[in-house]
Amino acid sequence: MREFGYERAHDVSGAVALLGADPDARYLGGGTNLVDLMKAGVETPGRLVDVRDLPLDRIETADDGGLRVGATVTNSDLAAHPEVRRRYPALTQAVLAGASGQLRNMATVGGNLLQRTRCGYFTDTAHACNKRVPGSGCSAVAGEHRNHAILGATEHCVAVHPSDMGVALAAFDAVVSYETADGPGALALGDFYRPVGDTPHLETALPSGALITGVTLPPAPVAARSRYRKVRERASYAFAIGSVAAALDVRDGAVHEVRLAFGAVASRPWRAHAAERALTGAPATAEAFAAAADAELAAARTLPQNGYKVTLMRNLVVATLTELAEEAAR
Ligand code: SF4
C-alpha cells in the first residue's frame, strides 16, 4: 500500500479546508470500501481526512416533517432508528440487507452513497478498466459480466452500483446535502450520479472537494407501506444481482401512488419512472404490475451473460407490489 498522511477533522469547514489544501486527499468515513481499495492499489490517496468526529451523526425531523440524516450516521443506526422503521420501512430493510453487522456498524450514510462498483475488473489492477484508468478499455464487455448493468450503461462501462440503501433513498426522493469551500449545496439523488457516457470515472455531480453532510428524506406518507426485496447468490453478505424498493398506496382497487426503484441493474440506483407512470391509476393487479415492469425494462440492453436480469427484475416487481397490495387489502 502506498504511504499516506492522516488528519482527523473536528468541524465541517475544517474538513473542507484540509481537503481543499491537498488535491491528493480523500475523506475517510467508515473506511469499509476505501481502505479495501487502497490495499488493492485501486485508490492511492496521499492523505486521508477522517470525518468521523464531525457533528453529523444525528437523525432529526426536518421542518417540513421529513427526516434529516447526518452523513456520518452509521448504517446500523440508520436501520434501527424508530422513525425510519415506522415511516420508511423499505430503507431499514435495504440497509439490513447489505453487508454484515460488523460492516454496518462502521459504514456511514455518506460513504454508502460514494462506494465504488464491485466489478472484478475495477478492483483488479491487472485488467483494463475505463473507470479506474480512463481510456484503457472495459474488460467486462467481452469478459465476465453476468452481474453487470442492463439499464443506462454504455460500451465504456457496464458496471452496477452496489448500494442497497441508495435504492430505497432513490424511491423516496432523497436529497443529498454537501459543503464546499464556497458554501453549502444540495443535489436530488436523481441528479447525484452522473450518466455513464464516455466518462465512467466521473461518478457523481458533487463539486470538487465537496463533503457530503447529510441526506434528507422528504415526507412521503406512501413510504410507510414500503418494501425492499433483494436477490443475491447466497443467503447473506452478498451484493444484489437484482433488487427492488417499492411503496404502494391502493385506493378502491386502483394504484393511487407508487414508488419504485431498482438496484444492481445500472451504474446508479435506478428510479423506475416509466413503471410508476404506467401504474398510477391502473388496477392493483399482477397483470398491471407486470406491464409496468415491462414499460421500464423496455429500455434494457443486455449482454450475453446478463439477459436473465430482465426476467428477474420483472418477477421482483410483480412479487413485491403484489405483497404490498395484499397487505393493503387486509
Ligand atoms: Fe471497469 Fe466499468 Fe468495465 Fe467494470 S464495467 S471493467 S468498472 S469500465
Image (cartoon, helix red, strand yellow):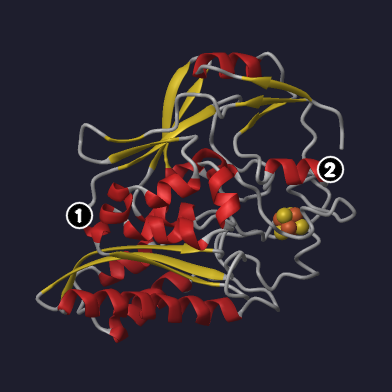
Count of numbered labels shown in the rendering: 2
Crowd rating for badge 1 (residues with CA inside 10 Å; few <14, some 14–19, many 20+):
few
**Residue located at (81% from left, 26% from top):** 4
Image height of 41 relative to 221, above or below: above
The x, y position of residue 171, in whole percent, is: 37, 56
**Residue located at (70% from left, 78% from top):** 304
Residue 194 visible in the picture? no
Q: Mark 1 points at which residue?
A: 221
The residue lying toward the viewer, choosing from 45 and 313, is: 45
Rounded to the nearest whole Å, what is the CA distance between mark 2 and mark 1? 45 Å
CB within 8 Å, label 2 to label 1: no
Crowd rating for badge 2 (residues with CA inside 10 Å; few <14, some 14–19, many 20+):
some
Q: Which amino acid does label 2 sit on?
A: Gly
The x, y position of residue 174, in whole percent, is: 37, 45
The x, y position of residue 282, in whole percent, is: 21, 75
| Left or right: where 232 falls relative to 55 | right
Q: Locate the C terminus by quadrant.
A: bottom left
Q: Quadrant of residue 184?
A: top left
**Residue located at (37% from left, 80% from top):** 318
Q: Residue 41 carries which label?
A: 2
The residue lying toward the viewer, choosing from 245 and 100, is: 100
- Report helix, strand or loop for mark 2: loop
Q: Which of marks 2 and 1 is nearer the N terminus?
A: 2
Ligand 1: quadrant of the figure: bottom right
| Left or right: where 289 falls relative to 221 | right
The x, y position of residue 151, in whole percent, is: 55, 64
Image height of 229 relative to 189, above or below: below
The residue lying toward the viewer, choosing from 68 and 301, is: 68
Image height of 35 relative to 314, above or below: above
Name the residue at the left extreme: 252
| Left or right: where 187 falls relative to 103 | left
Mark 1 vs ligand 1: CB below 8 Å: no
